[in-house]
Image: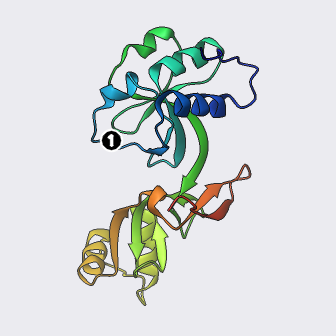
Amino acid sequence: MTEPLRVSDTNLVTSISSRCNLQTGMVAGRFDSSSGLNNLNNIVMKTTHTTKDGFVWTIVSKGDAIVMFRNGGQIFKIHPDESETLIEDELDFADDFVMYGVEGPKIFARIDSKTGKGMNEGYVVNEGWDYFAEKSDLVEYLRSQISDGGEGLSDEFILNDAYNNDEYYYTEWDVEDEMYYYIEQPDGTMKEVENNNL
């Protein structure tokens, strides 16, 4: 019989992950949001999932999530649209079409050229010379490349002209497929690390 989890455990998530592997023999993997979410509530898995906002979640079964919640752990519901909701009451576990996760560090595939913040979706300029999360910052950059700042030209015209000349495109990155990614540090700076899972 598996030893019950205690809130005093310092490696609570690691303990759960170890239990998961012992009970199911499953290896760590990534969650495919197109697969049945329902199945996650009936089996125990060790996996991680990175949402577009950069959060890394250790995904746990509904059963383990309830145990952690009862012991004071902070558990989130991760919805199919990748939004997340903090579990505040045991009734919140009634939803069968979500994942249950424990929050990890924020990781990103690229760094915004203007703000220095991480991003997992946005605009790529000149095949990766610059990156912008916000359209307004992209427009500002494009105007800076025109001798008179594009005076008299609308933002829409500048965007369309640049797009038609292959100067930028919009994309999303799956950070878990990147050779390198960035971890947001407590002071807001980004630390580049190699992805050892590839």
Question: Most extreme residue toward the bottom, as rendered?
Answer: 147
Q: Looking at this view, is 85 or 180 the one in front?
A: 180
Q: Amino acid at mark 1?
A: Ser
Task: Determine whether 75 is above or below 179 in the image.
Answer: above
User: Circle 1 — which element?
Assistant: loop
Image check: 147 left or right of 105?
left
Residue 189 at x, y = what percent? 69, 59
Q: Looking at this view, is 182 or 159 the one in front?
A: 182
Image check: 178 left or right of 10?
left
State the count of labels.
Answer: 1
Residue 186 at x, y = what percent? 72, 49
Image point (65%, 29%), residue name: 15
Is residue 122 something that shows in the picture?
Answer: yes
Q: Looking at this view, is 116 or 33 the one in front?
A: 33
Quarter of the image where one finds residue 140: bottom left
Residue 67 at x, y = what percent? 57, 15
Image point (44%, 61%), residue name: 177
Instruction: Provide the residue designation for mark 1.
Output: 33
**Mark 1: few/some/many CA within 10 Å (<14, 14-19, 20+):** some
Task: Determine whether 57 is above or below 143 in the image.
Answer: above
Quarter of the image where one finds residue 169: bottom left
